[in-house]
Image: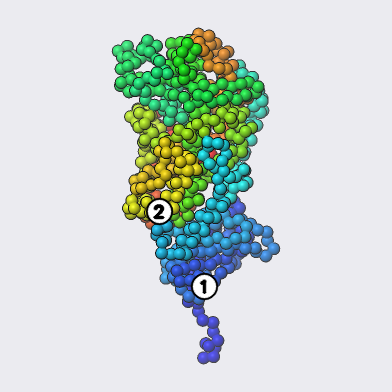
Amino acid sequence: MAAMAGATPSPVATYRIRVATGSSLCGGTMDSISITLVGSQGESPKFLLDKCGKDFSPGGVDEYEVSSPYDLGPILLVRLHKERYGIFPQTNWNCNFVDVTAPGGTVYRFPCYQWLIGYQTLELREGAAKTVSMDADNQLLLRHREKELQAKREAYKYKEYQPGWPKCLDADTVEDLHLNDRYSATKANAFNIQMVMAEIELKLKGLLDCKNSWRKLDDVRRAFWFYRSATAEYVSKHWAEDSFFGYQYLNGVNPVVIQRCAELPAKFPVTQEMVAKSLQKDTTLDQELKKGTIFVIDCQILEGAPGTVLNGSLQYVSAPLCLLHLNPQGEMIPIAIQLTQQPGPESPIFLPTDSEWDWALAKFWVRNSTFYIHEVLTHLLYTHLVVEVFLLATLHQLPTCHPVHKLLIPHFRHTLHINVLGRVNLFAPGGLIEQATGTGFRGVSHLLAKGLSTLTYSTLCLPDDLHNRGVESLPGYYYKEDGLKLWEAIKSFVSTIVGLYYKSDGAIKEDSELQAWVAEIFDQCFFRRESSGFPAHLETTAELTKYLTMVIFTCSIRHASVNNGQFDFGSWMPNYPSSMRKPPPTFKGGVTFQDVLDTLPDVSTTCNTLLILWLLSNEPGERRPLGCYPDEHFTEEGPKRAIAAFQKRLAEISEEIDKRNRGLPLPYHYLNPPEIENSTSI
C-alpha cells in the first residue's frame, strides 16, 4: 500500500504528435523545438520535441507523445517554440504541418508550410477553413486572426515604385524578402546559371557588344543556336508570310489585342479600291465588315510614348493601325496598315500590293508596336503587377484560416521574388530593358501608367474580354478555345469551394475580411477608379465566384499564355523586333532592304532582347503545374473532393488539347494544363 501511495499518477491525457519538415535542401534545423497544445478547455505545458537520433531532417516526419494533466478538449491552436540548442548556431526551419491525435483518436491537422527564422514562437490554427463569422463566439480565435493579420501588415508594406503604377511590396532586393517568398537556393541557382550560360554564348560569338546593323537577316540564326525549339524553327521559316503574321495575333504571345471591326474608324480611311485585290472578286469591304470578317489591331495607346537612345541611336515609337481579313480559307490576313493615328499625305496606308520592302517594313512596325503592348501591358501589368496586389491584399486582409486565403495562396508562389527581381534587374533605370527595347525605362513607365488608367475588370475576365472584342466565335483561335475550357474548369472548382463556406449572399456581405480584401485591391491597384469596373465590394456568391476565377486565371493561365512562348516567337528577331532605329516612312516606294536592316534592332540590342526572352520563357525547375497542390492548406474532405474533381477536369482538357495538336502544323500548347504554372513565378 505504501508503494502505491508513493507512485506517480498516470497523466489524464496523452497526445500523439507528428511534425513534418519540408524537403527543401536546408529545410531541417538543429534548434530546439517545443510544442504547446491549446484546446477549448485549456493548454498543455510546453513540451520539448526530442527523441533519440536526429530530429527535423529535410523531408522527415517525426513522432512524439505529449502528456497533459487533463483533457484539453478540441485542439484549437498549437504553439511551436524554436529556441537555441546548446552551443549550436541558429538554423532556419521549414515546417510543413503538425498533426495532433487526441486521446479519443480525433486527428487535428495544423498546416504551416513556412519557414521559421531565428528564435521565435509560431502559433498555428487547426486547419479547418473558417470565415470570421464562424469564429464569432470564440474570442481566442478572433484574437489570433487579428494578431496574424497585424503581423503581416507590418511585414508586407506597400510602396509606390512609379507614379501611376499599381502599388508594390516595399522591398529593394530579393534578400529583403522573407524566405517564404523567395526561390529556393536550387531554383535561384538554376535561374542564375541559365542567364550566365546564355550571356557567355553570345559574348563568345562577339554578338552582345556589337552595335552594328545585321548584315543580313539570316545572320540572326547565329544567336542562341543551341537554344532552339520546334516552334522557333517554324517561326524562322514562315515569319514573312502574311497568313502567319495574322495567325500570331490569335495564337502567338499576344493573343488579346485583335478585335472585330464592325465599322472603319475615321482615322483609318481604308477604301474598297485599296483592298480589292486582297478580297475575293465577289465581295466588297463593306460586305465583309457586315459579315464580321474584318478585324483591327489599334495601337493607339502608344501615341505619345517616348523613345530612348540605344547605342548612341535614337529609337522611334509609333502607334499603327492594322486591318485584317478572315478569308474563306480561315486565314487571318493583313490587308492594310497605317503607321500613325493621324491619316494624311505623310501617313500613307500600306498594302500587300505595295513593293516587297514597303509592305515588309509596315508589318515590322506593327510587330514592334505590339511587342511594346505585349511586354509592358499584356505581360508585365496585366499579370505580374496586378497579381502582386492580389497577393499583398490577401496577406493583409485574409488570415491563413480563411477559405479564400487557402484557395489562392498556391497561386502566389514565388511571385514576389520574380517581381522584385524584375524591379531590380529588368525594368529599373539602367536595367536590361534599357539595353533591349526602344522605349527604355521612361517609355515603359509612361506606357504602364497609361495602361493602368484604362485597364478594366472585363479585360481580365476572359469571357467578357472575348465578347467585348467581338471574337468569341472566331475559328482557329486556340487561345480562346483552350482558355474558355480552363476558365470554366476554374469557375466550377471555385464555385464548389465558395458553396462550402458561404451558404447565402448574406454571408458574402457580412464577411468583413473578404470585403476589406476586395476594397484593398480596388484601392492599391486601381486607385478607386470606378471606370475600371473592378468592384470595391462583393454582394453575391456569383460575384465572388467570378472574382476568384479571374484571380486564379490571371495568376496562372493568362500569364502562361503571354509568357511561355516569348522565346519561341521572339528568338527570330525579325518576327518580334524590340526597337526601331528610323522613324516610320512618310511616303511609299522608297524603302530598300538596307533601310529595313538599318531600322530593325542592331546586333547588341537584339541579343539583349534574346537574353530576356530566353530567361522569361524557361521556368528554372521546381514547377507546380496548374491544379498541383502538394501543400495541403485545406484539411476537410469537401475541398479535397473539389480539388480532385478540378484535377480530373484539367487532365481531360489536356487530352483534348493533345488530340487537337496532333493535327496542327504548329501545335498550340501554351494552355495545356501540365505546361501552365500555378502562379506567376517567372
- Residue in the picture at 34% in, 16% down: 285
- Residue in the picture at 47% in, 43% down: 523
Q: Residue furthest bottom?
A: 1
| Badge 1: residue crowd in 10 Å (few <14, some 14–19, many ≥20) | some
Q: From the image, tell me which residue sits under label 2.
A: 511
Q: Residue furthest right?
A: 87
* Residue 442 to residue 490: above or below: above
| Badge 2: residue crowd in 10 Å (few <14, some 14–19, many ≥20) | some
Residue 511 in percent (x, y) is at 40, 53
Point out the frontmost of discs 2 and 1.
Answer: 2
Check contact, mark 2 vs mark 1: CB within 8 A.
Answer: no
Direction from residue 429 to residue 357 in the image, left or right: left
* Residue 75 to residue 595: above or below: below
Q: Amino acid at mark 2?
A: Asp
Q: Label 2, label 1: how many angstroms apart (C-alpha)?
A: 38 Å
Q: Amino acid at mark 1?
A: Ser
Q: From the image, tell me which residue sits under label 1.
A: 67
Direction from residue 202 to residue 60 in the image, left or right: left
Q: Secondary structure at mark 1?
A: strand
Residue 291 in percent (x, y) is at 30, 21
State how many labels appear. Answer: 2
N-terminal of the pair, mark 2 or mark 1, is 1
Q: Is residue 226 visible?
A: no
